[in-house]
Image (cartoon, rainbow, N blue to C red):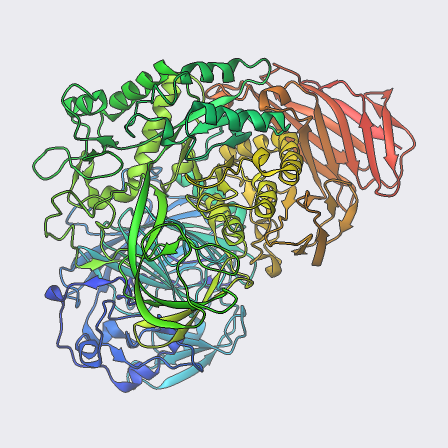
């Protein structure tokens, strides 16, 4: 574990360390704790700086006596003014904890056929108890840029996720960019980057009395390497400040950071980080990069509306780290159990998980783009979606009937807005039962679907809502999905072997299919086929929807102008679910009676405590449950109530889901919970492919590692607000400043103008899930014209582009909101449709080698630190930059543009050569788009559907760089057939610009259907042009001397053949 550095060695020690957590929502049973240790010496505690504290007492109720009983330090965290670092531990590990109180020792270091190995042995139990006393470490050199380190119990088989299937490598890579070094005098190992010849252990070797304890950093500024290392002598605890003679960019260094704990249901590991620029660790609504200021990221898939400081729908224990050199690396912990990952100011990282093993992969990069490619090589490349799936989608929860559905689609068409796919939410169902439809309200649905498919040249598509739960209370013989599931034994079971009963939408009870069961494919295919026989849907939406009600204890108030002043919230509340906040001129979704009306606020501070119900509409295939566990509760055992519970919302693993001891074919739900939606996605994708004999199009809310190989994802039920729109990129949101009131209650002041960001769209690119989007114009709450106008512009550039809103709110399909929204929507979507050949080619590249579709700007400019925190803009691939407007009443966008030639997409004018802050014009009907010099974008004249567009001529937008060069590619197939790339049934064309000559060269011509002609070429950055030839013949052209744009029209060049276009 650990690596990467600029011309240096990276030290790394596998000391997997002690409990480190924030105090909220933590449960750690005292029954198994090893207490009564002597407190550490004062010097061992004062040597640890505040920023390097690792929590030794995770649960609530810590005090000095209890802390000392674990052999840990007790020093209250210092305050800065009235601010308190809420997670700064009072109780923390002293320096050399393992040496003081016993821990693992290392032995049996040896070379193996695949790498190296070592053994760790301990003779005394940790304070948690139930320790695994002998641990094996296997380091496998799998490829030149991938190191696999596995820390496990060699005597007992423990849970390891069966999916996704990791590559098996039994040989040892001979040419690697890393070396693993064990030292039998220290518990841990070092990793040295092989590309540098420097070895930096000389200082310690020349001073043998210096310790193995690293306790603090110092001397460097923000984002700078430290200038000295604070060391503690092992004999007398004397502090020694030792100069560093190298640039320190450790990637993963767990050496000497506390007690390594590997217990049955509690495993922890801590590491230094190379910088504060850490990305990933999803799914969370958090900053981009993630904050290292005492941040906790809990991974436990949950039916939870998006909000800060809570676990959401997906689990992705992968992070990407930037280093001072501009290099990047990635670390992936392959573990499906509930876990916390903490980032502290050191900067340091802590893993805590309740099961499995430490199965870790280190991806050497060295560029950020390389890291993601290496990660998707490991977990699975993204799938290529059907071409029509990249068109615009329309949906809402609350269509009254089929006529209402048709009306929304018709007014969209009549407004001239491109539209490919019409959806229905659960409104179409009979009694909210899956695999049924309401033959009264939705009479004629099969005919409607047929009409969509057959509408002249438009050929639209239909998707329907597919719940992954079934009624468990229907009379025998009346509901085939239940009867057949019982017959095949494919439902999740309780301890008695009967189907596990919970409650979701169904009137009485609910059962859940077990998608790890080998007969689940047979069952799911029969069910989906029965629906397909009724109407030929084109894809599926795998989730369900619920209404969640939670209770808060609040204090709050508004001023005389109805401005929200603030809310005081008890930090120990079990459930936290924010649907909205009260701001001036807005309604709020918090009421004293649970209804969706304005809370009766006051004109001044109201200090009376109020019990308030908060309603949030949510979806679930996490799986979710209206109950905590089953209808009869859950057994009191170590699975349902483990000795340690991460910081999950609700405070319990069974909160809003099923019991942890429920049985699935592949094991206990305790281990499989985070994988539920992933297994459903695999089965659904497989079955739809077999039924339709075409590419599947499936969207899932819940996710796990590898999901992007099968389906797409959307960000859940966000609110119709400027803040939530910005969160989807990420963008601007709400920052909560925490002020100390008491140890348990804090004041949260709301700032609506402070820049804060999330990781939704960009992080899913890191996780290998490129087909991702959010509900355009928002789901919860009524939108407004100004918001929806800008959101439609942004949403036109989500890879998955769908307008969707909730039941009971005003219609928000663009045509229902008036001319301004229609104009902006048409303009943005017509640009999207013109760029679909480029977007589709990006999905091909993602499938081929793991390239990103939506690209964080710093991926393209890793040597420019100013790009590391850009979160209000993103790129499609490496050639197109999208800079949306994310605030109200704004017609400009301020953005830092790195060094490159940047052209205005609309005019073709060169705007800047970058390297500076820039202000872009953004009229109300326009989203700023910039083309990066050096790139060629394949395009197409847009139609009202993808089917119509594909019949039109291709176009090229050619943007020259400083040297007059550019390149690009077009991937093209029929857009719907299964396995076209694998079968070679595609055409791939390479484009190249050198000075005043553009060439096109087919690399493969396995697909020649439809129109493959190039009709128009637009070249940006042309200093002059007086003549143009195409394949030796004269061509029609126009030259714009002001913007220096050459437009060549009237071409009829087959892209199946090579071509050359020149100008002078």
Q: Which quadrant of the structure image shows residue 230?
A: bottom left
Q: Residue at x 45, y 69 (%)?
A: 603
- Above or below, 190 relative to 1064: below
Viewed as shown, does residue 931 lie left or right of 563?
right
Q: Residue furthest left?
A: 496
Q: Observer-nearest residue: 454 or 687? A: 454
Q: Observer-nearest residue: 560 or 205? A: 560
- Residue 751, percent from left and from top: 51, 65
Viewed as shown, does residue 472 lie left or right of 813?
left
- Residue 55, percent from left and from top: 29, 70
Viewed as shown, does residue 75 lie left or right of 80?
left
Q: Residue at x 30, y 25 (%)?
A: 430
- Above or below, 602 relative to 760: below
- Above or below, 559 relative to 421: below
Residue 301 seen from this side: no
Q: Which quadrant of the structure image shows residue 11?
A: bottom left
Q: Can you say which quadrant of the picture contains the C terminus? A: top right
């Amino acid at each position: 574990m650990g690596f990467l550095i600029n011309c240096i060695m990276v030290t790394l020690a596998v000391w997997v360390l002690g409990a480190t957590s924030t105090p909220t929502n933590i449960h750690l049973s005292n029954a198994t704790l090893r207490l009564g240790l002597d407190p550490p010496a004062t010097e061992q505690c004062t040597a640890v700086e505040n920023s390097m504290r690792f929590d030794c007492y995770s649960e609530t109720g810590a005090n000095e006596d209890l802390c000392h009983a674990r052999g840990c330090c007790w020093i209250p965290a210092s305050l800065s003014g009235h601010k308190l670092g809420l997670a700064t531990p009072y109780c923390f590990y002293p320096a050399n904890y393992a040496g003081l109180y016993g821990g693992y020792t290392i032995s049996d270091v040896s070379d193996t056929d695949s790498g190296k190995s070592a053994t760790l042995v301990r003779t005394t139990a940790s304070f948690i108890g139930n320790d695994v006393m002998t641990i094996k470490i296997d380091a496998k050199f799998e490829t030149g840029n991938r190191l696999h380190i596995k820390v496990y119990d060699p005597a007992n088989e423990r849970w390891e996720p069966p999916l996704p299937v990791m590559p098996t490598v039994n040989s040892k890579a001979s040419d690697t960019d890393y070396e693993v070094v064990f030292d039998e005098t220290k518990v841990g190992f070092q990793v040295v980057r092989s590309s540098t010849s420097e070895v930096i252990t000389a200082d310690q070797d020349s001073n043998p009395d210096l310790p193995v304890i690293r306790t603090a950093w110092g001397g460097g500024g923000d984002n700078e390497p430290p200038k000295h290392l604070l060391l503690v002598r092992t004999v007398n605890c004397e502090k020694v400040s030792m100069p560093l003679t190298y640039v320190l960019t450790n990637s993963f260094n767990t050496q000497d950071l506390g007690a390594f704990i590997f217990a049955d249901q509690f495993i922890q590991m801590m590491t230094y980080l190379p910088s504060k620029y850490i990305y990933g660790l999803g799914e969370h609504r958090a900053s981009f990069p993630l904050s290292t200021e005492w941040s906790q990221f809990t991974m436990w898939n949950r039916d939870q509306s998006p909000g800060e400081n809570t676990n959401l729908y997906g689990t992705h224990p992968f992070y990407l780290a930037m280093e001072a050199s501009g290099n990047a690396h990635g670390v992936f912990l392959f573990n499906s159990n509930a876990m916390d990952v903490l980032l502290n100011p050191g900067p340091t990282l802590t893993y805590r998980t309740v099961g499995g093993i430490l199965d870790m992969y280190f991806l050497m990069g060295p560029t950020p783009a390389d890291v993601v490619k290496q990660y998707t090589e490991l977990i699975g490349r993204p799938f290529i979606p059907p071409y029509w799936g990249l068109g615009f989608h329309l949906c809402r929860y609350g269509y009254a009937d089929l006529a209402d559905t048709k009306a929304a689609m018709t007014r969209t068409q009549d407004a001239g807005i491109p539209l490919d796919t019409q959806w229905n939410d659960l409104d179409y169902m009979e009694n909210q039962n899956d695999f049924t439809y309401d033959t009264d309200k939705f009479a004629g649905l099969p005919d409607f679907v047929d009409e969509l498919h057959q509408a002249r040249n438009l050929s639209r598509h239909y998707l329907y809502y597919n719940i992954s739960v079934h009624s468990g209370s229907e009379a025998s013989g009346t509901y085939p999905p239940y009867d057949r599931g019982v017959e095949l034994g494919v439902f999740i079971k309780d301890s008695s072997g009967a189907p596990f009963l919970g409650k979701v939408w169904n009137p009485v009870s609910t059962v859940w299919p077990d998608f790890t069961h080998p007969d689940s494919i047979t069952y799911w295919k029969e069910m989906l086929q029965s629906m397909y026989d009724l109407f030929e849907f084109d894809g599926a939406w795998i989730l369900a929807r619920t209404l969640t009600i939670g209770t808060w204890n609040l204090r709050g108030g508004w001023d005389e102008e109805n401005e929200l002043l603030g809310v005081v919230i008890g930090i120990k509340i079990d459930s936290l679910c924010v649907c909205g906040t009260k701001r001036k001129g807005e309604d709020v979704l918090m009421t004293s009676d649970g209804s969706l009306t304005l809370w009766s606020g006051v004109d001044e501070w109201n200090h009376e405590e109020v019990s308030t119900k908060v309603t949030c509409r949510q979806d679930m295939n996490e799986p979710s449950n209206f109950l905590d566990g089953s209808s009869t509760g859950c057994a009191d055992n170590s699975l349902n109530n483990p000795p340690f519970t991460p910081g999950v919302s609700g405070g319990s693993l069974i909160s809003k889901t099923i019991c942890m001891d429920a049985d699935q074919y592949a094991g206990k739900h305790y281990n499989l919970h985070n994988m539920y939606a992933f297994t459903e996605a695999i089965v659904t994708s497989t079955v739809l492919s077999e039924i339709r004999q075409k590419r599947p199009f499936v969207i899932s809310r819940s996710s796990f590692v590898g999901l992007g190989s099968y389906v797409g994802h959307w960000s859940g039920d966000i609110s119709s607000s400027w803040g939530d729109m910005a969160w989807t990129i990420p963008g601007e949101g709400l920052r909560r400043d925490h002020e100390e009131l008491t140890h348990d209650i804090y004041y949260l002041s709301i700032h609506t103008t402070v820049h804060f960001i999330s990781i939704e769209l960009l992080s899913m690119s890191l996780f290998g899930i490129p087909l991702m989007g959010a509900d355009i114009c928002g789901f919860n709450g009524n939108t407004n014209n100004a918001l929806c106008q800008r959101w439609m512009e942004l949403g036109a550039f989500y890879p998955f582009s769908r307008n969707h809103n909730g039941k009971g709110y005003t219609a928000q399909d663009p045509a229902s909101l008036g001319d301004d929204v229609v104009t902006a929507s048409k303009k943005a979507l017509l640009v999207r449709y013109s760029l679909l050949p480029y977007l589709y080619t990006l999905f091909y590249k993602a499938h081929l080698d793991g390239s990103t579709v939506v690209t964080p700007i710093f991926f393209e400019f890793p040597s420019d630190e100013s790009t590391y925190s850009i979160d209000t803009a993103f790129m499609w691939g490496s050639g197109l930059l999208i800079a949306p407007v994310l605030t109200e009443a704004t017609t400009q966008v301020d953005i830092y543009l790195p060094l490159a030639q940047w052209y205005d997409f609309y005019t073709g004018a060169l705007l800047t050569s970058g390297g500076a802050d820039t202000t872009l014009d953004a009229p109300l009907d326009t989203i700023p788009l910039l083309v990066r010099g050096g790139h060629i974008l394949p395009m197409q004249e847009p139609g009202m559907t993808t089917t119509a567009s594909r019949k039109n001529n291709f176009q090229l937008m050619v943007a020259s760089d400083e040297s007059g060069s550019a390149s690009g590619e077009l991937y093209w197939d029929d857009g719907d057939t299964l396995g076209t790339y694998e079968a070679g049934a595609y055409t791939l064309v390479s484009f190249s610009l050198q000075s005043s000559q553009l060439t096109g060269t087919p690399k493969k011509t396995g697909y020649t259907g439809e129109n493959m002609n190039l009709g128009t070429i637009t070249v940006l950055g042309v200093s002059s042009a007086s003549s143009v030839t195409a394949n030796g013949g004269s061509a029609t052209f126009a030259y714009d001397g002001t913007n220096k744009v050459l437009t060549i029209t009237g071409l009829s060049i087959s892209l199946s053949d090579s071509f050359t276009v020149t100008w002078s």
